[in-house]
Image (cartoon, grey):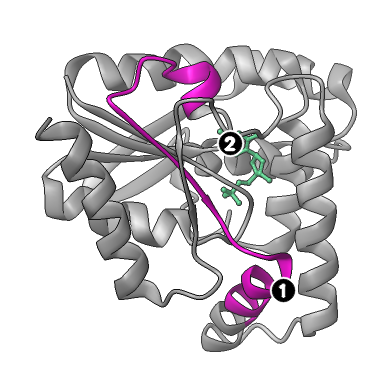
């Protein structure tokens, strides 16, 4: 099986690029951030602090997380509810980052993620795919951009959706999430030694896509 691991900080364009690449390559796209977001959302809805490991751990046995692909789009479900849209808020992102620091949550998701890569060609994005989840991935890409470039992109996405979060707030969130994701003890965000670094600060979407296609083609075609 071929696996492509894409890691990097929030807002580097991972999911948009990964989704398009997976469609091009005919691989299954696995958005692991969506899994952490769903658990974060579940904790928030249960009235629990996502940073409280004990409280979140007590919820894990009742969490039924399921992924499905509808017309090539990944949908994520909590039991029977499609939460694909509900998890896309800044609040759910922060909650995801908080539960992502919880080792029990990471263990809970690890098997699910590895199993997906066992039976099909996947393109998986997250923070620890190349380092922990798929250490033997065929291709590893570490996608990054400056905090300002990433905040600008995220702010534009919000504007397009009619969400009026001020830019300063988005930038502060990006920086806080970077800090949390890189400083946690459990599977912190870092570039795998054998990952190819791609900085997209100065690249537009198509240029980033082409650069990634080239990296993949070199590794997959040999
Ligand atoms: O990629 P994203 O913004 O949807 O991810 C949300 C949060 O989930 C991110 O800040 C950290 C956490 N996460 C993680 O810890 N490990 C992953 N493989 C993916 C996401």
Q: Quarter of the image for the N terminus: give it.
A: top left
Q: In this figure, which residue is indicated by the disc labeled 1?
A: 148
Which one is nearer the viewer's eye here, 167 or 39? 167
Q: Nearer the viewer, mark 1 or mark 2?
A: 1
Residue 71 seen in the figure = no
Q: Position of residue 164 (x, y in %)?
A: 71, 87
| Residue occupying the point 77% across, 28% down | 101
- Pointer 2 local density, CA inside 10 Å: few below 14, some 14–19, many at least 20: many
Res 175 → quadrant? bottom right
Tell me if the residue at label 2 has its CB under 8 Å from ligand 1.
Answer: yes
Query: Mark number for residue 127?
Result: 2
- In this view, 163 is above or below 18: below
Position above or below: 52 against 10: above
Q: For the magenta stretch, what is the residue range? A: 130-155
Viewer-side residue, 146 vs 127: 146
78 in magenta:
no
């Amino acid at each position: 099986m071929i696996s492509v691991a894409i890691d990097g900080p929030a807002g580097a364009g991972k999911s948009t690029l990964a989704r398009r690449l997976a469609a091009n390559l005919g691989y299954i796209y696995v958005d692991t951030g969506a899994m952490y977001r769903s658990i974060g959302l579940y904790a928030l809805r249960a009235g629990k602090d996502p940073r409280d490991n004990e409280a979140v751990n007590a919820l894990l046995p009742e969490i039924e997380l399921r992924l499905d692909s509808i017309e090539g789009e990944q949908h994520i479900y909590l039991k029977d509810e499609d939460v694909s849209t509900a998890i896309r808020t800044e609040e759910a992102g922060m909650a995801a980052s908080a539960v992502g620091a919880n080792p029990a949550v990471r263990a809970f998701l690890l098997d699910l993620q590895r199993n997906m890569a066992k039976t099909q060609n996947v393109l998986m994005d997250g923070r620890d795919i190349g380092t922990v989840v798929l250490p033997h991935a065929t291709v590893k890409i570490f996608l990054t951009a400056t905090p300002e470039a990433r905040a600008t992109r995220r702010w534009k996405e919000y504007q397009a959706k009619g969400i009026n979060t001020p830019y300063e707030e988005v930038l502060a969130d990006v920086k806080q999430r970077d800090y949390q994701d890189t400083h946690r003890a459990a599977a912190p965000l870092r570039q795998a030694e054998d990952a190819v670094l791609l900085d997209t600060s100065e690249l537009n979407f198509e240029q980033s896509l082409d650069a990634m296609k080239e990296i993949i083609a070199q590794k997959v075609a040999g």
